Image (tube, rainbow, N blue to C red):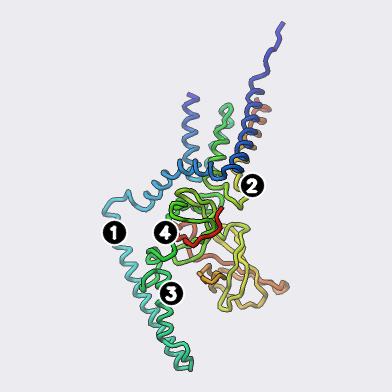
Amino acid sequence: MKTILRIILDILLVIAVINGWWSVAIVLVLIGVWFFKLYIEIIIAGVAYDALFGMTSGMGWRGYEGTIFAIVLLIVIKLLKKLVR
Amino acid sequence: MYIRTSKRPGQDHARMAAYIAAGVVVVIIAVQLLVPHFLPSIFTTIARPFWRMEFSVGSGSLESPGSLLAENESLKTQLAALNVQQQSVQSIANDNSELLTLLGRTDVSASNIQSASNAQSATSTGTTSSSGPLSSLKPIPGRILAAVLVRPPQAAYDELVIDIGSDHGISYGAKVYAPGDILIGSTTDILGQTSKVKLFSSPGETYSVLIGSSRIPATAVGRGGGQYQAEVPQASKINQGDTVSDSSISDAPFGIVSAVLANPADPFETVLFAPPVNIYQLRWVLVATSTGKKI
């Protein structure tokens, strides 16, 4: 059951990233990172978003905001889960 | 006696997550240094069919024939109205030239204005017909029509993604124009079948422009959301509604002044302007095919 929910969440995440709905994607990855173990899809989503809409010469580090945000969020939520549980 | 022989699973997961994050960072840095377009190419290839399908749906490809016919008739009616407007504008231009001649300006004759007007129309539309928003979408020498697949605010980085790339000979730094020959940006990332367009209105971007009837040179600074600002000397007599044009030899239209913020204590006044098109609703753009800097 949890696997099916994770697959559904991943499909929604793919749709959000492809369409550039970064706010929707953030909500989805927050849910995924909190409820699932080792939710590395967040990093894939961040890299994909940057590859689609960023990673342009001249943007500097701003073209990698999605990846940076995903990694930071993954680490922060992991620490929070460790504190809470 | 209980001896714990293994660490808590949570610590393993946390360590694995840290390793994965570090690995991703290293891989991305290495890939971007060695093959900069590898990751964008892969993900764009995956996303492109979805963007094209979305564009087709938005263009009405899946609408009923009846609704498409009704829309066609409506567009024809609008075009006829625009043609009538253009004729009245031409009539006013002719009256203007006659008045100039009466006032002794024989160097600016009606035929000169007419030929200049025809040349401008021919350059911008490829024909001598009216230069409305629909006619600017016809093939124009030196320009390629491109569909906008992704636009702000959908794209978080204040840029456009268009459906042509190196397959159509697009090069880095090519100028991009909205319908109406309005300069809005330049190409940055060129992939096989798509390209990214950096808007000049992106925060921090600068571009040289000429403002108002006095053509005061200024530097347009992007504020995001299709908005610009520029600093000009006090008492420059710039008013709301003045035109802003490209400072290069093309002299392409750039924007319309929306507000002038003046502080008598300040030697400069701030001019706010925006292009006369809504970049959030752009569906088509024109890309110049003159070669630019390649990366």
Residue under pointer 1: B70
Real-space Cα distance between discs 3 and 2? 43 Å
**Cβ–Cβ below 8 Å for labels 3 and 2?**
no
Relative horizontal placement of residue B166, taking residue A27 as reference (left or right): left
Secondary structure found at label 3:
helix
The spot of residue B88 in percent (x, y) is 37, 79
Instruction: Say which of marks 1 and 4 sits in front.
Output: 4
Image mark 1: chain = B
- In the image, are marks 3 and 2 on the same chain? no
Q: Residue at x 61, y 78 (%)?
A: B237
**Cβ–Cβ below 8 Å for labels 1 and 4?**
no
Q: Earlier in the sequence, mark 4 or mark 3?
A: 3
- Taking A84 as reference, is B115 above or below it? below
Secondary structure found at label 4:
strand
Residue under pointer 3: B120
Residue A18 shows which numbered tag? none
Residue under pointer 4: B145
Which residue type does callout 2 highlight? Trp
Residue under pointer 2: A61
Q: Residue at x 70, y 12 (%)?
A: B4
- Taking B35 as reference, is B91 above or below it? below
Which residue type does callout 3 highlight? Gln
Residue B163 visible, this orientation:
no
The spot of residue B202 in percent (x, y) is 58, 57
- For the N terminus of chain B, the image quarter is top right
